[in-house]
Amino acid sequence: MQWETVIGLEIHVQLATQSKIFSGSSTAFGAEPNTQASVIDLGFPGVLPVLNEEAVRMAVKFGLAIDANIDEKSVFARKNYFYPDLPKGYQISQFELPIVGKGYIEITLEDGSTRVIGVTRAHLEEDAGKSLHEDFHGMTGIDLNRTGTPLLEIVSEPDLRSAKEAIAYLKQIHSLIRYLGISDGNMAEGSMRCDANVSMRPKGQKEFGTRAEIKNVNSFRFVEKAINFEVERQIDLLEAGGKVVQETRLYDSTKDETRSMRSKEEANDYRYFPDPDLLPVVLDPAYIQSVRDSLPELPHQKRHRFVEQFNLSAYDADLLSTERETAEYFETVATAAGDAKLAANWVNGELAGALNRDNLELAQSPVSAEQLVQLLKRIQDDTISGKIAKTVFEAMWNGEGDADQIIETKGLKQVSDSGAIEALVDEVITNSPSQVENYRNADDAKRPKMLGYFVGQVMKASKGQANPKQVNQILLRKLNS
Amino acid sequence: MTIERTDVQNAAHLARIAIDENSIDEFTQDLANILALVDQMQAVNTDNIEPMAHPTDAVQRLRPDQVTEVNQREHFQALAPATENGLYLVPKVIE
């Protein structure tokens, strides 16, 4: 049977506020255990949570960026369950009236095509503490510093049809929250966490199959692997005549498999009700407009502009617009060099490759946009060839100076002196009598291909420094005469 | 809406409240009385009335995003049954 994969993602994003969502405790990462947990976070009797205005603003920013409906009124509710890292016995969340309603995210796939994925809702809630299961004399250690850190939970529609689409969506959210400056999106530190609901149905069937939820997978790569494993598992199960059980499963990256964690029946009875400690949040249209006015140009807007303004492929435009820093770097280079395609090739090629190899962020790049511009200008004015430029780039990367300095001190300047090139061409022609004869006997259609041999020889003799255009011209003149 | 003994037991379990086997019937009756009152209120016509999330007709105040709390860990942990290296210790929880 042909199966169709149906995936929905729930993404938790920690908002980059200074203080917690309902208390004045710091949210800084990595502090000594329990030094950032106040009476409110600890759920002492008689305390009152007061909502952080910046958390609200960040949620609204996100909502507007995905064209979502922002209701004038939203309500906080208690989600009741018991776990040691949740001292109150309930998590303050939103249930019936979330701050962000239905919205949309456009994703770009590897072949450059785009799809629109629905976002059901996004709501504000508080994070729980951390349980440390290392052995404390048979007990569990609890650190409540994370308790009360603001979270935005972004729930997608079951619109995703493969692990690849799920990753594209996840990356798009990651890109968006970083553009908006509402989160660093660091998955390794848990500032962005992802649960995936996965189900299968026979192709063409309308009803969804029973889904399993994979919890808290902490990297893009693992999300993809976990989904792929789960798809295989469910297909095997269904084809053997079995049934998928609705349950929560945990992904084990060392074994690359998902395992049953708990069945949903009991765990899901959260008995939500409006939190009497918090009043409805009311946002007036002028406030929402002022947040809208503060939005930067968003990744999908940049992507479309790069295609139109710079004539780039959808694929190049997507790579360049994913990170705000990369987009700005590219635009600086493209504008100053006056050749967007050349700039895109260098930013997505040599620069991205070198950053990747040395595991650096763009902000740490040893080659600045201005330095790259100088290098590209030397390609454009024929001082060096594209091939030599890569050598110069490597030297710039290693801190040996600017492009001009390196070209000068290493003597990499392209030979454009036609006399010198002619001498090299003559030498190659004299030393390759049989190739010359073959060439002269060949018809016009075959000649261009055969010319490559001579160009290669001349370039080799010049140690790559001869101007390839001139080499071509001189060779053609001499061989065709 | 009717309520059974098992509903009471389930609610007690979810709320982690230990109730005496002998008092389950009594609780069932009490809750049935409360639900009867709810039924009575459900009969009132509420068309065109917006549901309230809070009894006072007020709006949530927001606070500026500032760190105002200081570390009081030693103070809080003086009350805890067991601590180590700054962590609260609780009976082992395994998923």
Image (spheres, coloured by chain):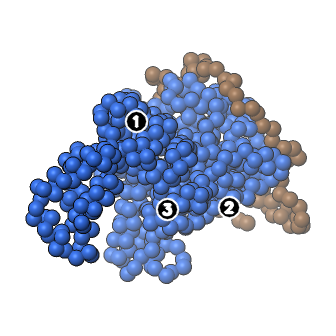
Chain colours: A blue, B brown
Residue A270 percent coordinates (x, y): 61, 53
User: Camera-side residue: A261 or A416?
Assistant: A416
> Of tags 2 and 3, which is closer to the observer?
3
Q: Which residue is mark 3?
A: A313
Residue A463 percent coordinates (x, y): 23, 44
The residue sitting at 43% across, 36% down in the picture is: A367
| Chain letter of the residue carrying label 2 | A
Determine if marks 2 and 3 fall on one subunit. Answer: yes
Q: Quadrant of residue A89?
A: top right
Q: Which residue is mark 2?
A: A102
Q: Amino acid at mark 3?
A: Ser
> Of tags 2 and 1, which is closer to the observer?
1
Q: Within 10 Å of the Cα at label 2, are there few (<14), some (14-19), or many (20+) other Cα atoms?
A: some
Q: Quadrant of residue A437?
A: bottom left
The residue sitting at 36% across, 44% down in the picture is: A384
Residue A250 percent coordinates (x, y): 41, 52
Q: Amino acid at mark 2?
A: Lys
Instruction: Give me the C-alpha separation between circle 1 and circle 3.
Output: 28 Å
Residue A80 percent coordinates (x, y): 62, 47
Secondary structure category for the residue under label 3: loop
| Chain letter of the residue carrying label 1 | A
Q: Quadrant of residue A50?
A: top right
Instruction: Give me the C-alpha separation between circle 2 and circle 1.
Output: 51 Å
Q: Within 10 Å of the Cα at label 1, are there few (<14), some (14-19), or many (20+) other Cα atoms?
A: many
Secondary structure category for the residue under label 2: loop
Determine if marks 1 and 3 fall on one subunit. Answer: yes
User: Camera-side residue: A122 or A60?
Assistant: A60
Q: Which mark is residue B83?
A: none
The residue sitting at 67% across, 37% down in the picture is: A21
Q: Earlier in the sequence, mark 2 or mark 3?
A: 2
Q: Within 10 Å of the Cα at label 3, are there few (<14), some (14-19), or many (20+) other Cα atoms?
A: some
Q: Which residue is mark 1?
A: A403
